[in-house]
Amino acid sequence: MQYSLIAWSAVFTIQLGAFATDWVPEIHEGCNLLASQLPGRVSFPNSTQYALSNIYYSGRQAEIHPACFVTPEDTEDVATTMKILTSSSIPFTVKSGGHTAFDGGSNIAHRVTVDLVRLNQIVLSDDRQTVSVGPGNRWANLSETLDPLGLAVVGGRVSDVGVSGLILGGGISYFSGRYGWACDNVRNFEVVLASGEVVNASPQSNEDLFWALRGGGGSNFGIVTRFDLVAFEQGDVWLYTALYPLSSSTELVPAFVDLSINGLPADHDGHTFFIMTNLAALGGFIIANYLYHATPPTTVGDTPEVFVKSASVAGSFLNTTTVANITTHSKAISEPYGGRKAWAGTSVYLGEGAAQLLQDIIPFYKEHANLLIETAKETNETVEPFFVYQPITANILDAMQKNGGNALGLTPEKGPLVHIQVTTHWETAHLDCLVRQSAADLIAQIQALAEERGLFAGYTYMNYAEKNQDVYAGYGQVNHERLRSVASAYDPDGLLRSLWRGYFKV
């Protein structure tokens, strides 16, 4: 679902003349210095480029107003920007796609936001094995380029998500069953360090930095200015989507767990996720079951063998089958920008009793959702509470171990798990505190019950985390300490730790 021209125009108009920034003299001087060194690349309040840069997925980010935006056009510009910011001790943050839900994730009040939107190169190697991608791209830019060529990369499932944030936080993909996450399929990172030095990180060069950038986030290490991604042959993708009343969870949850433990590890082309929400137009609480396959059946109407059991669960009141390219699929689940968004997450192991646990926490979610819905009614607002199960299966864990493994701390020895995502969309700041607290309470309830039953995994996917969650604790002590060591090696003065604000810090 995309914004109409009218909606985009409204956002632009609001941004263009909405406010006067509270200037901090040193920051004002820093913005002017940047403008003198990077003419045409620095924008100030009440300018067209500033308004365009301050468009974000979540209103919690868009309502923040930096002193200026810097929009570098190449790696050299990023290096110049970094040198000025760090040498002048100017707090800053960096925006790739601007899809972080929480306030301050990739925007900063009265300081400097570096918008990478102009670093949008997409270059395919002559042998069609590697795509070099700038961090200013959204995943739709890549799929629109690669679909006609019969190629794909392990990338985001939602068209508007930025390339950089998804990869650096891990990167769940339609193709993770065969290849692992997006971070596992980067051949090389080009990185601007805190000093302004440009380095490459790969299995052959700066191997420790290469490891850290695969899931460790970017704000501790440097600004990535190019990702060299593995490309592979890929045609259309098959999708079966079915909607059920929430009461069908008693059959759908065991089928989901069986698929995650026994089905998907045997068929690496399969991918699934499982969404619960409340839609008054459809009668209240529902479940949407998504089943993707990278190799569509040769006979129209057939279902891939791995999904036969899940797709045969009775009680669906609406179902569709789609065979289409990646761009079509990613745009189908894209969400409009605007409104307020929040994410939070946790995970549980797919061990003995997992199906019962995943069933037993659904009432916790319903209690959370009903609280938000009833409170929103008091001020005539709407709220959309989502509860999402996404499996991290044995075959994905195996694929994550390539090139020395990533930083996430997920291993085959620990076993497969399910990431549980709490997502909320709402209208005004009136509900901000309640949304955050209720989501935190729900996560705490889930974790307490999982711990009681010996299934608590502790991992939180960075890209679905709320800002107050301790993401790195879930990576394990050894990996957390190693990430700190890598950060110290490449930024010995701790400049990024102190100056790059807003995102998760090791």
Image: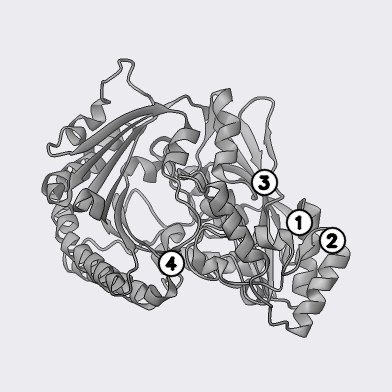
Q: Residues within 10 Å of mark 2 (few under 14, many from 20)?
A: some
Residue type (three-letter) at the residue carrying disc 2: Leu
Camera-side residue of 349 and 445: 445
Distance from Cα at disc 4 to Cα at disc 2 = 36 Å
Question: Would you say residue 450 is visible in this rendering?
Answer: no
Distance from Cα at disc 3 to Cα at disc 4 = 26 Å
| Residue found at the very far right of the displayed protein | 36
* Residues at marks 2 and 3 touching, judged by CB atoms closer than 8 Å: no
Distance from Cα at disc 3 to Cα at disc 1 = 12 Å
| Residue found at the very far top of the displayed protein | 299
Question: Would you say residue 397 is visible in this rendering?
Answer: yes
Q: Which of marks 3 and 1 is in front?
A: 1
Q: Residues within 10 Å of mark 4 (few under 14, many from 20)?
A: many
Please tell me which of labels 4 and 1 falls first in the chain: 1
Camera-side residue of 286 and 377: 377
Q: Is residue 77 above or below residue 503?
A: above
Q: How many marks?
A: 4
Residue linked to disc 3: 134
| Residue found at the very far bottom of the displayed protein | 25
Distance from Cα at disc 4 to Cα at disc 1 = 30 Å
Q: In this view, does 320 lie above or below 227?
A: above
Residue linked to disc 2: 38
Q: What secondary structure is marked by label 3? A: loop
Residue linked to disc 4: 471
